Image (cartoon, rainbow, N blue to C red):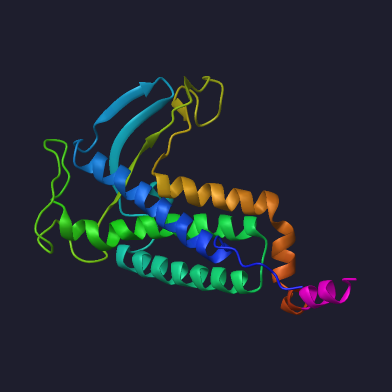
Amino acid sequence: MKKKKTFMTDGRMAWILIIAILVIDQLIKIEVKTSMSLGESIHVADWFYIYFIENNGMAYGMTFINKLALSLLRIIAISAIGWYIWRMVRRQARTRYIIFLSMIVAGAAGNIFDSMFYGLIFSASSPYYISYFVPFGSGYSSFLMGKVVDMFYFPIIQTTWPNWVPFFGGNDFVFFSPVFNFADACITVGVICLLLFCRKDFDTKANPDTAESAPNQTIGSEE
């Protein structure tokens, strides 16, 4: 029996999801960067602040390698994951697997977009004034050297370590202390969901022979 074609294929859904995440991420970042000074915070709740910072590193402000090398590594990783998603769509992998992978690649692309273009189109951010758009190429840095914009801060617990705790006694303690952006959140949620709900997909994709033979076995068993 001939299968009816559907408009919303997994491939199209992946593209729509990636574009939607990129648009939302960039709209939030541009709004924060052009309306807040560096280090400014907006109190939303005692456990939630909009806190504008910038970083040169990876998700949640981490940094341990050269900025240019990090940007190139991100581009390679995004290309590799994008190619992998394309392969999984062609192999008719589960929709949830495609969705979570798309969230990861979209989040990574959102941060690399900052590095690629923000240094070219924005003035430098400062605690004393608000950044603004400049003619392309006359910004604060060069291609791939722009800073990533972060803004979400959730100090859910703010307390002090008891004095009897070794090394940390008497010091302030904040949970959750990292400042992150929408792209970081998409990467984190995508990775966690993959580990929780798609472990079977990892096993199947690790054995391509099994994955490719499965559809044939299904067709052969139809009555």
The residue range painted magenta reads 213-223
The residue lying toward the viewer, choosing from 223 and 170, is: 223
Where's residue 190, x and y in %?
Answer: 55, 51
Quadrant of the rendering where the C terminus is positioned: bottom right
- Residue drawn 41% across and 19% down? 46
Q: From the viewer's perspective, is residue 169 above or below residue 89?
A: above
Where's residue 191, x and y in %?
Answer: 57, 53
Where's residue 122, x and y in %?
Answer: 16, 52
Does residue 145 appear in the picture of this structure?
Answer: no
Q: Quadrant of residue 76?
A: bottom left
Disc tally is 0
Does residue 150 appear in the picture of this structure?
Answer: yes
Please state if 209 lies on the left or on the right of 175 as rendered. right
Q: Quadrant of residue 22?
A: bottom left
Please state if 193 lies on the left or on the right of 184 as rendered. right
- Residue 45 painted magenta: no
Please state if 218 lies on the left or on the right of 79 as rendered. right
Where's residue 67, x and y in %?
Answer: 31, 62
- Residue drawn 55% across and 62% down? 7
- Residue 218 painted magenta: yes
- Residue drawn 54% across and 66% down? 11
Quadrant of the rendering where the N terminus is positioned: bottom right
Q: Quadrant of residue 51?
A: top left
- Residue drawn 48% across and 49% down? 186
Q: Main secondary structure of the magenta part?
A: helix
The residue lying toward the viewer, choosing from 60 and 213, is: 213
Please state if 84 lies on the left or on the right of 204 as rendered. left
Q: From the viewer's perspective, is residue 170 above or below residue 195?
A: above
Q: From the viewer's perspective, is residue 173 above or below residue 31?
A: above
